[in-house]
Every structure is written in structure tokens, then in C-alpha cells.
């Protein structure tokens, strides 16, 4: 059965350091949920999001997203 919300690990990433630290964990997952709801993206940080390509391009990881277009 799925884990309850209290049993689920989640990360709030608001710095580049947190993003980089989270990547090793993400690469080991079988599924990934992402909430892309945002009201502002700093153009200074857009170039840093390329690190997510490893995870999002991996066909073995199921991705579930919210508020994506």
C-alpha cells in the first residue's frame, strides 16, 4: 500500500545547494512527484535546473507532476 503523508519524505528546494544535495536521493527512486506551481522563477537560477535532466530523462523513474503545461 502507498505510504501515508506522515510516512512520506518530501523536500522543499529553495536553494541551489539543496537541489544538488537532493540529486543523489532522486537518482535512486522508482517514482517521483513534482509540484511545478510557482508564481515567479528567477532567471538567475534557470541555468541550474539542468541537473534535473538526469532524473527526468530516466525512463525507469515514474514521474507524476502537478501544474505543468
Image: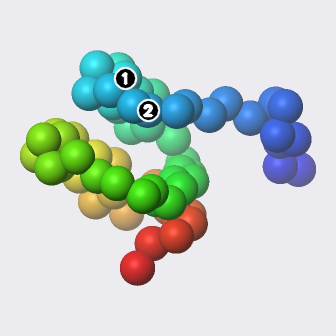
Image coords of residue 63 (percent x, y)? 50, 61
| 58 sits left or right of 8 in the view | left
Colour approach in the figure = rainbow
Residue plotted at (62% across, 34% down): 10
> In this picture, is 35 found above or below 49?
below
Disc 1 from disc 2: Cα separation: 6 Å
Q: Position of residue 17 (x, y in %)?
A: 28, 20
Q: Is residue 51 visible?
A: yes
Q: Earlier in the sequence, mark 1 or mark 2?
A: 2
Residue nearer the viewer, 27 or 19: 19
Q: Is residue 24 visible?
A: no
Q: Secondary structure at mark 2?
A: loop
Q: Is residue 69 above or below residue 42?
A: below
Q: Residue at x 82, y 40 (%)?
A: 5
Checking the image for residue 35, the label placed there is: none
Which mark identifies residue 18? Answer: 1
Q: Residues within 10 Å of mark 2 (few under 14, many from 20)?
A: few
Q: Residue at x 84, y 31 (%)?
A: 6
How many callouts does the rendering have? 2
> In the image, 49: left or right of 32?
left
In percent of width and height, residue 62 lies at: 52, 61
Q: In the rendered view of the protein, which quadrant contains the C terminus?
A: bottom left
Up the image or down, 7 lies above or below 40; here it is: above
The residue pinned by badge 2 equals: 13
Q: Residue furthest bottom?
A: 69
Helix, strand or loop under label 1 = helix
The image quarter containing residue 24 is top left
Evaluate if marks 1 and 2 touch, with contact meaning CB atoms under 8 Å apart.
yes
- Neighbour tally class for label 1: few under 14, some 14-19, many 20 plus, Cα within 10 Å: few
Q: Position of residue 57 (x, y in %)?
A: 28, 60
Amino acid at each position: 500500500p502507498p505510504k501515508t503523508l506522515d510516512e512520506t519524505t518530501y523536500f522543499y528546494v529553495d536553494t541551489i545547494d539543496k537541489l544538488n544535495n537532493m540529486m543523489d536521493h532522486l537518482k535512486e527512486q522508482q517514482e517521483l512527484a513534482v509540484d511545478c506551481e510557482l508564481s515567479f522563477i528567477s532567471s538567475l537560477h534557470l541555468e541550474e535546473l539542468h541537473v534535473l535532466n538526469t532524473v527526468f530523462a530516466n525512463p525507469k523513474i515514474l514521474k507524476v507532476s502537478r501544474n505543468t503545461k
